[in-house]
Amino acid sequence: MTQSPITVSEQTSMKEAVLTLQRHRIRHLPVTNGTKLVGIVTDRDLKRASPSLLLEIEREEVEQVLRTTLVSSIMTREPVTATPDTPLVDALRLMVEGKFGSVPVVNGDDLVGIFTEIDALKVLIEKEEKDSGDSSSGSHSL
């Protein structure tokens, strides 16, 4: 789990959300009101909501949409969440069954972290290295 993840508010513009994702090299942004989780927005949500440059509209019009559309209008409200006590296998099952790239981690309504595909891969690497005793060869093959 990544503790204290990068977040945005409901009043964040799509443009600022895109820049935040790029700046931090992440794909999932919990949306908060203070510390309370109110939604999540992903790079896919932002791409889907963005006007296509293939349409015959001016670049300035595209920029206007990105500047004026708020994250609150495209975010997933009430996302599936986990708690700090959720067993790893249960969090992974939520992600696989829901085809989610991440699960926000909450304590009550408060966001305390996010568990992402990358976090899951890190856990797998650590386990493989521990099980094999050698970081260069894992115990399982593809």
Image (cartoon, rainbow, N blue to C red):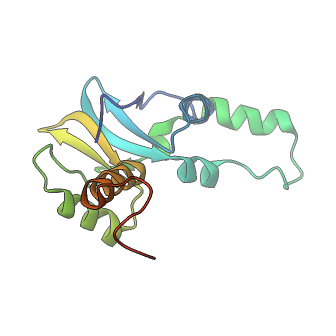
- Between 29 and 33, the one lying in front of the other is 29
Question: Residue 87: x, y in percent?
Answer: 13, 56
In this rendering, would 90 be left or right of 29? left
Question: Residue 12: x, y in percent?
Answer: 50, 28
- Between 85 and 50, the one lying in front of the other is 85
| Residue 104 quadrant | top left
| Residue shown at 29% from the left, 55% from the top | 133
Q: Residue furthest top?
A: 34
| Residue 18 quadrant | top right
Question: Residue 68: x, y in percent?
Answer: 62, 31
In this rendering, would 125 be left or right of 61? left
| Residue shown at 16% from the left, 37% from the top | 109
Above or below residue 130? Residue 41 is above
Q: Quadrant of the C terminus?
A: bottom left
Q: Quadrant of the N terminus?
A: top left
| Residue shown at 25% from the left, 26% from the top | 35
Above or below residue 141? Residue 104 is above
Question: Residue 127: x, y in percent?
Answer: 27, 56
